[in-house]
Amino acid sequence: MLYFSPQERQVILFLAVVVLIGTGINFAVKRFPAAEAVSCSARNLGKIELNEADKDALMSIPGIGEKLAFRILSYRAQEGKFMEVEDLKKVKGIGAGKFARIRDMVYVK
């Protein structure tokens, strides 16, 4: 029979608890897809979603005025949804510098 010291028992108990918690979290994410959506929305808190934003929301981003907001909306209407944030570079008036300044303020679902 195996005999463990009190410290070894504590380590084994700790590892068992970590495995159980990890298994529970994994089960929750697979069973309830909304749990993943909550974690995703927490990462994007305070950011503007490019495919849902209206003119006023776009204009709330520093560096985007009325004309550029209109161009973004026109691009979205003509080309369809933005597939990734980098697609903003295809909009006339958004160069590398402006994109670098606004990239962290927007996201795409």
Image (spheres, rainbow, N blue to C red):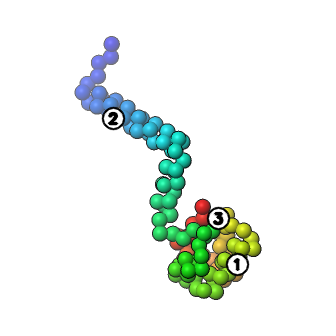
Q: Which of marks 3 and 1 is in front?
A: 1
> Which residue is pictured at 50% across the width and 59% down the height?
41
User: Identity of the amino acid at label 3?
Assistant: Glu
Q: Mark 2 points at which residue?
A: 14
> Which residue is pictured at 50% across the width and 64% down the height?
44
Q: Which residue lies furthest to the right in this view?
A: 78
Q: Which of 99 and 20 is in front in this view?
A: 20
Q: Name the residue under label 1.
A: 74
Q: Report the side of 9 relative to 50 (left or right).
A: left
Q: Where is residue 10 in the image (x, y as percent from the top left)?
A: 28, 31
Residue 98 visible here: no
Q: Residue furthest left?
A: 6
SS label for mark 2: helix
> Which residue is pictured at 36% across the width and 35% down the height?
17
Q: In which quarter of the image is residue 85?
A: bottom right
SS label for mark 1: helix
Q: Which of marks 2 and 3 is in front?
A: 3
Q: Where is residue 90 in the image (x, y as percent from the top left)?
A: 70, 74
User: Identity of the amino acid at label 2?
Assistant: Phe
Q: In which quarter of the image is residue 94?
A: bottom right
Q: Which of marks 2 and 1 is in front?
A: 1
User: Identity of the amino acid at label 1?
Assistant: Ser
C-beta proximity under 8 Å, tags 2 and 1? no
> Which residue is pictured at 57% across the width and 78% down the height?
58
For disc 2, the neighbor class at 10 Å (few under 14, some 14 to 19, many from 20) is few
Q: Where is residue 87 in the image (x, y as percent from the top left)?
A: 67, 70
Q: Distance between the residues labelled 3 and 1?
A: 17 Å
The tag on residue 84 is: 3
